[in-house]
Amino acid sequence: MRRALFMLTMVVSVAGAAQPMVSIPDGRFAPLFGLDVGQQAFPIAGFRIDVRPVTRARFAAFLSANPQWTKARVAKALADEKYLDGFDAKTNPEAPVTGISYFAARAFCADRGGRLPTTLEWEYVAAADETRRDAAREADFAQRILDWYGKPNRPDDLLQPGSPRNVYGVEALHGLVWEWTDDFNGLFVTGDNRQDGDKDPKAMCGAGATGSARREDYAAFMRYAMRSSLTPRSSLPRLGFRCVMNVERSTP
Amino acid sequence: MRFLLSLCLATSALAAPEEKNVLALPTQWNTEAGKRTTLEAWKGRHYALTFVYTSCAGSCPLTTKKLKRLDAALEKAGKPLDLVIVSLDPSHDTPEQVKQYRARYGVEDAKRWNVLVGDDAQVRTLTMLLEFKYTKNPESGVILHDNTVFLVGPDGSVQTSMSSLDQPMEAFIDAVPASPARGQKRPSR
C-alpha cells in the first residue's frame, strides 16, 4: 500500500499534475526599450505564468509524446548541434531544462495550450521582488540581480533555488537560468541601425543605453543584450524557459 | 592551385548549408481570395518571400517598389517568380486593405503577386524560421522590422536573400535557376 502510494505520488509530481501557475494582474509597465517619445508605459493584459522554469522531467515527458523534438530527430532548421547536449531527465529531474532551442520551447508551451511570454510580459513580472511590483530601479534589488549575473556558472547551480518567490508568487526569474521569450529578437540594437532609417534610433550604439527608459536597470540591459545574441536555433546550457497562458476575458 | 583549393574550402566553410527553411514548421495563411493555404502550395518551385504591412509608411513603400523592379527584372531575364508577401499586421490587413495596397502600387492585376495574411502566431513562426526581426509598438501599432527579401527554393530552404532597401538585386536574380521546371501547378489564390 505504502509502495503504491509512493508510486502514485511520483507519477503525480512528475507527469500528472499541472505545472503550478499563478495569475499576473493587468498593469502598465515601462520596458527598457520600445517606448516611443511621449509614451510612459505599455498596458499589460493579465495572464497566468509558470511559478518555476520548465523542468527536465516535464520536458522528457514532452519528448516521449513528441519524438520529432528529440535530439536524434529534430530538424536542423529548428535547433543547432548543441540541442539537448547531455540531457538527462533522470538526474535532478526537477532542475530546469536547458539546451533547448526557441522552437522547442515554443512547441512545449503550445502543447500545453500556452505560449512563451512576450519580452514585455517577462520583464513586467521580473521587475517584482518579494514585496514590490516594480523594484527594478531599486538599488538593492538591482544589485542582487547583478550579483547573480556576476557569479561564475557551475553545473550544480541549476539545483539552486534562484531568486525567491516574488510578490506575484513567481520564483527563480533571476539567478537560475536565462529564459526564452516569444519575441526575444525584437530589439534592433545592431550595427545597421544608423543606416536603416526604419529602426529605433534610441537603440543605436550609445543611445542604446542612454536612450532607454530605465537607465538604472542595468540588469535588464544585460538581458536584452543576451537575447539579442541568440538565434531561434540557439541551444545553451544556461538557457531555459517557462510558459504563460492567456486569461479568458468577458467582453463588456 | 593549393591556394585556390584553400580559398574554395574557406569559401564553402563560410557559406555553410542554409538551415533556414520555411517548411520546417507548418504555417497557415489566408489568400486574397479568402482561401486557406500553406507554403506547401509553393513546394517544388522557387519564389521570393518578404514581409510588409499595408499601413506602413516607413520602409514598406520602398520594399514594394523594389519588388516591382525585381518582378520586372526577373521577367526580363526569363526567370519569372511568384512573389509571396506576408502581412506583419494581420489584425489590420483585411482583404479590403490589401486591395487598396495593391491599387496604391499599381499591382492590382499582378498575377505573380500573392499577399498572405495569417495571425500573429503564424507571423511569429514564419519570421523566426527566417530570422526576420520585427516588433510592434503595442500602443501606436507601428512595426519596426527587417527589410529582407528571401529567395526560397523548391524544398522550402532559403537560397539567398537581399535587403529590399539599398542592396543591388543582380546577385539575387543570378541565384534564380535559368530554366524553372515547366508544368508546375500555380497555387490558386
Image: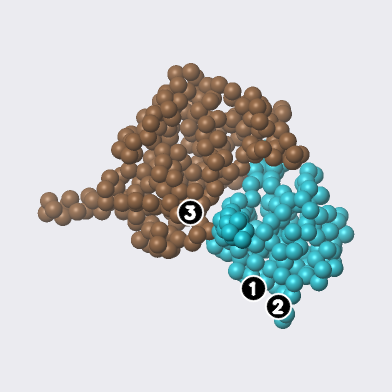
Chain colours: A brown, B cyan
Q: Is residue A75 visible?
A: yes
Report the residue that reaches farthest toward the bottom.
Answer: B183
What residue is shown at x 45% (from left), y 54% (from top)? A81
* In-front residue for pair B81/A145: B81
* In-front residue for pair A205/B63: A205
Disc 2 marks which residue? B181
Disc 1 marks which residue? B44
Report the residue that reaches farthest toward the top.
Answer: A139
Establish whether labels 2 and 3 are both on one chain. no
* In-front residue for pair B57/B179: B179
Estimate the spatial distance between the alpha carbons at disc 2 and disc 3, rounded to whole Å.
33 Å
When the figure is inspected, residue A162 is found, relative to residue A244, above or below; the finding is: above
Q: Is label 2 in contact with label 1 (beta carbons under 8 Å)? A: yes
Residues packed near mark 2 inside 10 Å, few (<14), some (14 to 19) or many (20 plus): few
Disc 3 marks which residue? A80
Side of A100 where A217 appears, left or right? right
Side of A86 where B176 appears, left or right? right
Secondary structure beneath dot 1 equals: loop
Q: List x then y, in percent, for residue B21.
A: 58, 61
